[in-house]
Image (cartoon, rainbow, N blue to C red):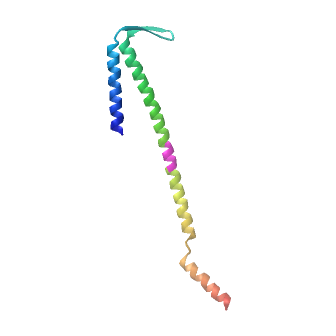
Amino acid sequence: MAYITLLFTTLFAFLIAIFAVQNSMIVNVNLLVWNIEASLVLVILGAASLGFLMALSLQFYAQMKMRYQLYKAKSRIKQLEEELDRKAQSCIPNPAGAADTRTQEVNMTE
C-alpha cells in the first residue's frame, strides 16, 4: 500500500511540475498588504508545497494522537491484566487451608 501511495504522490508531483513549467508568465500576487510580481511557476509550486506541508502537519497530528491513544489503551490493558491476576490469585484456595476446613467439618459432625 505504501508503494501505491508513493507512486500516486510522485505522479501527482510530476503533473504539477509539468503544469507549472508550461505556465511560466509573470503574474501579480496580492496578499493582504503585499503586492508581489512573481513567475506563475513559483506561485504554483509554492502553493503546492504549502498544501503538502499543511497536509503533512495534519497527518503528523493525527498520527501522534493515535499513538497516544494506543499508549493509553496498552496501559489500561496492562492494568486490567494485573487486576485479573490479583483476583485469580485470591480465588485459588490454599491447599493447606482446604484441608483445615475439611477437618473442621469432620469435627463438627462428631
Residue drawn at point x = 46 percent, y = 38 percent:
63
Q: Quadrant of residue 90?
A: bottom right
Name the main secondary structure of what is drawn in magenta.
helix
Residue drawn at point x = 33 percent, y = 20 percent:
17
Q: Is residue 9 above or below residue 85?
A: above
Q: Residue furthest bottom?
A: 110
Q: Is residue 83 above or below residue 49?
A: below
As rendered, which of 106 and 2 lies closer to the eye? 2
Q: How many numbered badges does the structure rendering display?
A: 0
Q: Is residue 57 above or below residue 87?
A: above
Taking the image as shown, residue 64 lies to the left or right of residue 99, namely: left
Q: Which quarter of the rendered picture does the N terminus lie within?
A: top left
Q: Which quarter of the rendered picture does the C terminus lie within?
A: bottom right
Residue drawn at point x = 34 percent, y = 18 percent:
19
Q: Which residues are magenta?
A: 68-73
As rendered, which of 49 and 98 lies closer to the eye? 49
The reply to whether the magenta stretch includes residue 98 is: no
